[in-house]
Amino acid sequence: MEYKFPNDLKYTLTHEWIRIEDSFAIVGITDFAQHQLGDIVFVELPEVGMAFERGSNAAELESVKAVGDLIMPLSGEIIDVNKNLTDKPELVNLSPFIDGWVLKIEYSHANEIDELLSAEKYKQFVQNEEK
Amino acid sequence: MDFIPHDKETIKEMLEAIGVKSLKELFQDIPKDLIIDKLNLPSGLSEPDLLFQIKKISQKNKNYSSSFLGAGCYYHYIPSLIDFVISRSEFYTSYTPYQAEASQGYLQAMYEYQTIISQLTQMDVSNASMYDGSTALAEAAIMSTIITRKNSVILLKGIHPEYEEVVRTYCWGQNIRILSTDEEDLHTKVKNEIAAVLFQSPNFFGDIEDISKLIKNVREKAPNCLVIQVMTDPTCLGVLNPPGSTDIDIFVAEGQSFGLNPSFGGPGLGIFTTKQKFLRKIPGRLIGKTNEINGKNYGFILTLQAREQHIRRERASSNICTNQALCSLAALTYLLALGRNGLREVAIQNFQKAHYLKKELSKIKGYEILNRKPTYNEFIVKCPNIDALINFCKQNNLQPPLKLSKYYPEMGNIALVCVTEMNSKKSIDKFLELARSALNSKKEENLK
Amino acid sequence: MNSNIQSIFDKENETIQMNFVPKMDIEQTNLNQIIPENLQRKDLPIPNVTEIEIVRHFINLSNKNYGVDTGIYPLGSCTMKYNPKINETIAKLSDFINIHPLQEENQGCLELLYHTSELLGEITGMDGFTLQPAAGAHGELVGLLIIKKFFENKRIKKQKIIIPDSAHGTNPASAKMAGFSIIELTSNEFGEVPLDQLEFALKEGDVAGIMLTNPNTLGIFDRQIKEITRLVHQYGGLCYYDGANLNPMLGICRPRDMGFDIVHLNLHKTFSTPHGGGGPGSGPIGVIEELIPYLPKPCLFSSEKGIMCNNNNDLSIGRIKAFWGNFGVIIRAYAYILALGAEGLKKVGEIAVLNANYLRVLLKEKYNLPFNRICQHEFILSDQGIPNEITTEDIAKRILDYGIYAPTIYFPLIVPGAMMIEPTETESKHSLDNFIEVMNKIYEEARTQPELLKEAPHNMPIKRLDAVTAARKPILHD
């Protein structure tokens, strides 16, 4: 299976992607993750203003037969959520890296960014998982 | 008797195909000292002997000709076609409809059950059933804590005592705090930290609450606190305002009155309904209508399953799996058979007949009706000699009303009386006659 | 072809239907004097439909539904055995169905409940039973609340429950409902509990107990069962037996002897009560003597005056359902146990296992069998190696075309593309051979006509439904 791994993004081992923009980050689930879950039917979004530690569950993505978590790649506060997903959860499948973004966070520990994976590293990880 | 089709030859043939020498060999993984020789049980019985033996046990029960007992389980007329419908093997010997294509009949019926419950209650969504009214109420309490992320619920006085106990057990499991109060004191207890206020109407003592007023009282103090109503005999909805016409968040009920026999209290039917906005938090199965992937027909399917335990495992909001499907089929059939005219007439007769007894009873010296609010088919009455009344009823083959001291020791002389459409005028008049005699028997005792 | 059956709500007609309400025989008061007008509903939108329309509607619907009485129902972990008809007759005796749960003259009902507890005690080896739980999952919750109360009473803080990854989904969900957190164990290559992992988890402390299904959901009897329960006890935990798979153990071996402290049974699986399309069921809980005081209220006991009921037990977890449990279901199970007796029950265990192994051996010729061992009541096939990327779902749908219900699919989760097959003891060899023939035919079709499977079913009232849209935009009523 061929998946997309845009080079300008950071990744996690739990299949989130992160776009760093100044003091905030945009987060979604990767192309590989949306394939694994299948057709997303519902996204449960957190409330704006909530703060999460890195590694905690911030959102849930449901398909017909599975539930996936979006795990906070960086500690911080939710400053925006993709409200389009409420009516069109399929955006996560159709456009995981653009229209299907899930959260915008104001991160609190910049040093955590260094621990995120590059596209190349994440790609290797996925290829190993596939085997 | 057993229900195994193989003869010895067949068993031998099958063992050979498997490649083992004996049935014993099939249990080779079980440590030898765990294998038992024989269960210490009697030998099997033939069908006639079995029927005879159990029938004898059943006859140790008393089957009354007429009843004044309700308190969460009611005698209503059950149309013959209900047993006929639920006895169709295609329904009652099927499993949960996991394979939708081979289960369209039942799925459509369950969808129609959800529809008729929505129509009856005017609530946005109904699930496909819970175990009974008491567990439906407990699950509603838990659901409210998940929605509001608060950890306390308030129980209003008048909830069926056994339901209240069930709610307490479930809430203890999840460390949910329970506060109890009555209507007068509600405003001091309702705060923003409360997940929900639970109440019953008509309540255990028969009172019909003014629900709109109650909701208003709650909302004024805590706008996000949910209001949950439970009902033990929803035939009253033939006349009463449906919960969906108010701002009730979750409405649950015991559906036994809809075509199910008392059957010593089970199986019953847990009716569970809520608002559209809480749909994804509802426990239990849901049936949805959808189209074929490549075709023009519509069909029915188990849906929103990602809420449930088989997918969400420990993150599911409820562990419910098996429900009361066949009972919901009975309820659907009952509501269809009665129809809007019939259900209204049932409700009217319950109101009228109970009212008649209430009115006549209050005319007898010494009897005092304690309800201050309107009532449906149950009411509470203070009796001058409750034990005599109960004994007289039994002697005359009338099932006596409930002595409230069963649940409330301090209410020793109060009876909870139930009258449904099944009570003829003759039986009610007989009850009144016995009530008068009970009074005299008390006088006699006093004279002594 | 449009094979849809018209909705019952479209069969409305304006007959005034009063067939099912007795004639009013008392003088009526103005309704508004009994109940204020503002509390009365303005309209009641349920339909009026004639009796013949209702009966035809449901008969037509029943024709589009498959039950055990239609044919083999090889749903793994569901034990879809024949439901004897005498049980229906007995459960409908008027001296049972008309009995009110709060009436005093109830000796018949109490005796039946008490006897059933005793019989289940002998079958499982447990010392005390409650028949209150309405289903297996309800029983699990009760069992876990007993564990919780047991440690609370002893003032020992224990908050974790160990559950293997092959467990039924209800196990972790029930543990959560009782306030526990879960430690998941990964099954070993035989589908058994790995002892080293188990001990590691136990050493961490805080473990209240373990929930196990044995035979497990792979149909395999855990050979280390005694060591597992011994270890858990050694670390002060309790052992919970998920009885969903008890059928093959009937008369062969008992959960108590395996070392379990608490067991739940599914009367609607093992003891032949009908599944009713998903319920009502009954999930009795059996416990060892030490745990009897913790059973839910009310508790029954035998005395000179007959069977009595104890409501005043301080240690009890409390009430978990109004009244007495699903009595109507319990009657059927009672009748079943008496009908079979000791010999009959043992035969159930033996033949359930014989039938499953017969299918296993003959189906593995073509299908992948991930755990190639003698199985108990059920076994797992997977879609690995089936030609032309045919999936488990494709096979399941094609099975329906041959007039057979499909196995449990995609469970347990630890085997990708699992098909879980449990024939039960009541299927004849002829019926099993027919199933094998169908499965082999389908394998051939996968090789030669894959499209036939990918588009299956073809002979059912409908084709595959759009589950995705159903979940995105739910339509839950008309």
Image (spheres, rainbow, N blue to C red):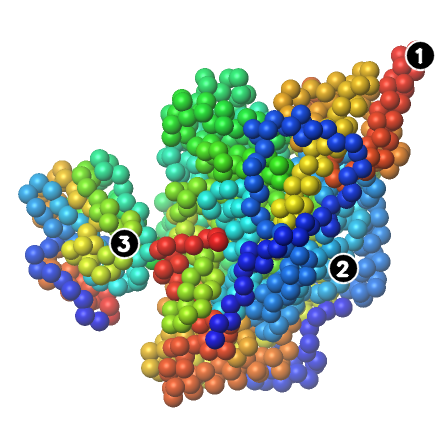
Mark yes or no: residue B2 visible. Answer: yes
Q: Quadrant of the C terminus of chain B?
A: top right
Chain letter of the residue beneath label 1 in the structure image: B
Neighbours of disc 2 within 10 Å: few (<14), some (14-19), many (20+): few
Res A40 → quadrant: bottom left
Residue at 61% of width from left, 79% of height from top? C431
Left/right placement of residue C328 relative to residue B104 reads right
Task: Report the residue marked by disc 3.
Answer: A88
Outermost left residue = A22
Tell me the distance, in whole angstroms, between the alpha carbons under discs 3 and 1: 82 Å
Secondary element type, mark 3: loop
Name the residue rendered at 69%, 76% in the picture: B5
Relative vertical location of residue C153 with respect to residue C456 in this rendering, above or below = above
Please state if C391 lies on the left or on the right of A73 as rendered. right
How many discs appear? Answer: 3
Q: Which residue is mark 2?
A: C89
Amino acid found under the numbered disc labelled 2? Thr
Of tags 3 and 1, the one toward the viewer is 3
Q: Position of residue B183 (x, y in %)?
A: 53, 21
| Host chain of mark 2 | C
| Same chain, labels 2 and 3 | no
Q: Nearer the viewer, mark 2 or mark 3?
A: 3
Residue corresponding to mark 1: B448
Q: CA distance from mark 2 to mark 1?
A: 53 Å
